[in-house]
Amino acid sequence: MGRPPIVSTLSLVALLVYSTVTAWATPPWEAANPIKPLPKPPLGIYSKLEDLPTPPTPERVRLGRWLFFDTRLSGDNTISCATCHQPEHGFSELTPHSTGIRGQQGARKAPGFVNLAWTIFPNFFWDGRAASLEEQALGPIANPIEMGSTHEAMVKTCEMKGYRPYFKEAFGSEEVTKERVAHAIADYERTRMSGNSPVDKWQVGKDEQAVPPEVKQGWELFFGKAECNQCHLGENFTDSRFHNLGVGWDAQKKEFKDVGRYAISKKDEDRGAFKTPGLREVAKHPPYMHDGSIATLEAVVEHYNKGGNANPHLSTRIRKLDLGKAEVQALVKFMEALSGEGYADTAPTAFPE
């Protein structure tokens, strides 16, 4: 018998090598979203992800990042969590109201969620109807005017061949449940931490040159005359509680356009009360308040300065402040100086198929 042709032998070897390399090649969606160690807290944030009762894992965070940005979780494949919670705007948005599938308009603005791994009271959404980040993550997916899907359809989407290995990696088996989807998304959200702002560099880092005198004046006002820290407190500058500022009060009809916390608690004193937002990255997402009705930070301070809008349930913490224009500007500069780093992200360029 003759020797096999050299070309054929080389071709067979090349095919085997190609097949082996192809089998081992990293899928494009893994290259676009590699496993990363949990981030360390930036300057000004003293809490650590590792200290949470159930700490995130890098595997769950990676899975959650895909799911957070994946429009296939919506009813028409056009909306993701990131559509309204935009990273470049502190995971909020620049519109007064959120827009869902088929261009439907909601009645509220998407709140930002930096540093929400730790809250004084675990209340999520403007009205606090969710008791955890996991519960919050599931709400918009099934809301007909937001992502417009169902939890059953969402699970079916995530049962595709491409996603199953990552559920196994994150949870120990390929089983997909709505609870696992929510857990992964929430763990990704927990890693979005903001700190190392000019204020942190000044207050924590003891760098006197980190902020100008106007910001230092704003700090004194915030914790003094203006009494902002009655509600905006802690490392994320929020008490996570609910307060009536008179926003949305219709003086002619003598009613609120949106009753806020009352819809959940059914307590009369909660009419028109909404959750205190955190102030980190607040300069990144005007307009402000639950309904986006106040255009600028200066206008927000002036709203407090005048004592809010009078109504039967106005918070007892709200009163006229008698701030001058320079003092109003100093408070604005202080809040702008709370813009930091550590939370930024962009969407993965590829997703499991």
Image (cartoon, rainbow, N blue to C red):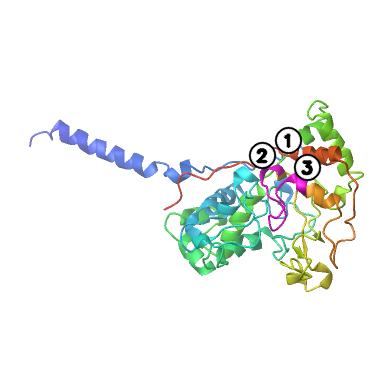
Residue 78 in picture, x, y percent from top left: 48, 57
Residue 342 got which mark?
A: 2
Marks 3/1 in contact by CB < 8 Å: the verdict is: no
Q: Residue at x 79, y 70 (%)?
A: 254
Three-letter amino acid code at disc 1?
A: Asn
Q: Residues within 10 Å of mark 3 (few under 14, many from 20)?
A: few
Residue 189 against residue 218 in the figure, above or below: below
Residue 196 got which mark?
A: 1
Report the Cα–Cα distance between label 3 and label 1. 12 Å
Q: Is residue 298 magenta?
A: yes
Q: Which residues are magenta?
A: 283-299
Q: Residue at x 34, y 42 (%)?
A: 22
Front residue (pair 71, 39): 71
Which quarter shows the N terminus?
top left
Marks 2/1 in contact by CB < 8 Å: the verdict is: yes
Three-letter amino acid code at disc 2?
A: Gly
Three-letter amino acid code at disc 3?
A: Tyr
Residue 187 against residue 123 in the figure, above or below: above
Report the Cα–Cα distance between label 3 and label 2. 14 Å
Q: Earlier in the sequence, mark 3 or mark 2?
A: 3
SS label for mark 3: loop
Residue 243 in picture, x, y percent from top left: 81, 60
Q: Earlier in the sequence, mark 3 or mark 1?
A: 3
